[in-house]
Amino acid sequence: MGLYQISKKIIVSLFEPEREQDFRFLPFIWLGGVYFLGIFLWGYFLGWRLVPFDYSDWVNINLPRLDVIRDALYYGQLPLHSKYIISLHGIDRFFALPDVITTPQMVLLRFVSLQTYILFDVFFFFSLGFAGLLWFRRHYKLSLIAFSLLVGLFSFNGHILVHYAVGHITWAGYFLFPAFFALMIKFVEEPPDWRWVAKVSFLMFYMVLAGSEHHFLWLLMFMGVLSVVEFRKFFWGFAAMVFSGLLSAVRLLPPAFSTSNFYSMGMKGPLSSYSSIDIPLKMMISYSAPGQNAYFQLPWLYWEYTLFIGLAATIFLFSFGLLPGLWNLFKANALSRTFRKFLLPGLFLFILSIGKNYEMLRATGITIFYGERAVSRMIIVPFVLLMIYATVNLQQWFNTHSKKFYILVGLSSVVIFYQLVDDLIVWQVKNAREAFGKEFIDVNYDLALNSITNHSDPVYFMALGVGLAITLAVSIFLIWQAQRKARHNQACAALK
């Protein structure tokens, strides 16, 4: 076989999953290359620990909070109160804010520097996101090209990059979106049970531990609307929502006893939303460097609005995501039946991010809804869903069209990747620090000192104790129910 024939077969195998077996190690090499390229790009974006995180929300909020955990591990103290009250929005109760990070991997802070830990944490969550996207590759038989395009769009769009650039390490929960959507697809396509409820609840609990309480609320709302759409399964959807909250009680109950602080922090203030439905489209293609505004005026900070993926990727999402989604809305194929169930939940979050629509939720008086002021952010949930749907449709298109389009799609993918990487280079922390370093620093902390200032606080301690008891009890219940269901299924399988 000549070089031309081999090259042709390799190209075809990149677009047709069933042809991957022609080259035994190609999938492993390609997928490994995509994963490690992603690791490299995130490391480059974060400056490989060589650029200090001494600007914007890195130093104003999240570094001091990480330092509290590090001091707790070093001095052997519970991090109940902190002297960094500015990073906690004016209170000293460390667990009284739902977006404080308390993930298990934080034990590494006992052994590594804050910058090293941040690098590890981003690598870890990127890996979770990559693993979640692999589920979609298996479930929908995505080719190597389609999967790589999905990884690029999900992992390096402007929304996630710019939030990390300004210090929003609590956006780690974003990387759990693929796992969440995989569970929602199972909810639609299979009969849910207690194992499904347990998986959703523990995933949502981990999202809360990651400090991603905003993402937690958005996904709860998504799941609530989906449960209404799938009304025959409403009990299971509602159970997943309730147990997600109960399992997270250790982190959500203490803030519930500090509602006055939320009101005093201006949670009833103005909303940051997209003023019209055309602005999200503009933010997908508008290019802006740190310190510059977009070519049209925004009422709040740029990173609360950006969805940058570039013109080529925007055309891709509309051509294979939005337009096919509307065209295939009432078709009877399995793909349409599944994804049209997500139309209403996704549209609900999209509508909430536009204008003053979110006010209807704040009008309920429910405290958790006051935590959302930058409501433009929640558009990222339907945005990610659109990425997934477009990629699956792209693969369906590969399966039914001539191979002569492969080169065109390949070149388009290169253009998309180039625009994503170019945006990453522009917004890397080195450039963001240079643009925002002096403008956005509110305080200077001495992170070398012990930050823990524990003192008597009975109400706060009661909330922590009750929350912990609820979390432990619900954990035991969910594990017991999941194992009970697994044993039942095994027994039924043995009888067949």
Image (cartoon, grey):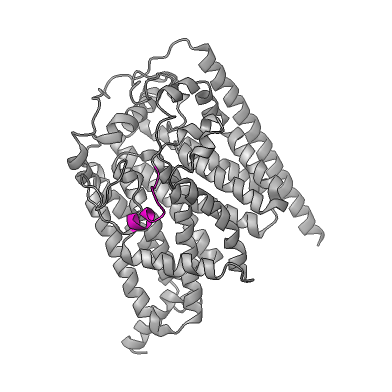
Nearest the eye: 188 or 375: 375
Residue lying at 27% horizontally and 46% vertically, measured from the top left: 46
Q: Is residue 63 above or below residue 153?
A: above
Q: Is residue 278 magenta?
A: yes
Q: Is residue 181 above or below residue 91?
A: below
Q: Percent position (x, y) of residue 133?
A: 47, 58
User: Quadrant where the C terminus lies?
Assistant: bottom right
Residue lying at 51% horizontally and 76% vertically, measured from the top left: 18
Q: Left or right? Give the position of 180 relative to 75.
A: right
Q: Percent position (x, y) of residue 368?
A: 52, 32
Circle count? 0
User: Quadrant where the N terminus lies?
Assistant: bottom left
Nearest the eye: 36 or 81: 81
Name, please, the residue furthest toward the top: 456
Residue 113 appears in the picture as rendered: no
Q: Percent position (x, y) of residue 385?
A: 49, 57
Q: Is residue 185 magenta?
A: no
Residue 174 appears in the picture as rendered: yes
Q: Left or right? Give the position of 190 relative to 137.
A: right
Q: Is residue 409 above or below residue 140?
A: below
Q: Which residues are magenta?
A: 273-284
Toward which corner of the image does residue 150 lie, by quadrant?
bottom left
Q: Left or right? Give the position of 429 relative to 490.
A: left
Q: Percent position (x, y) of residue 217?
A: 52, 40
Q: Left or right? Give the position of 340 relative to 119.
A: right
Name, please, the residue furthest toward the bottom: 1
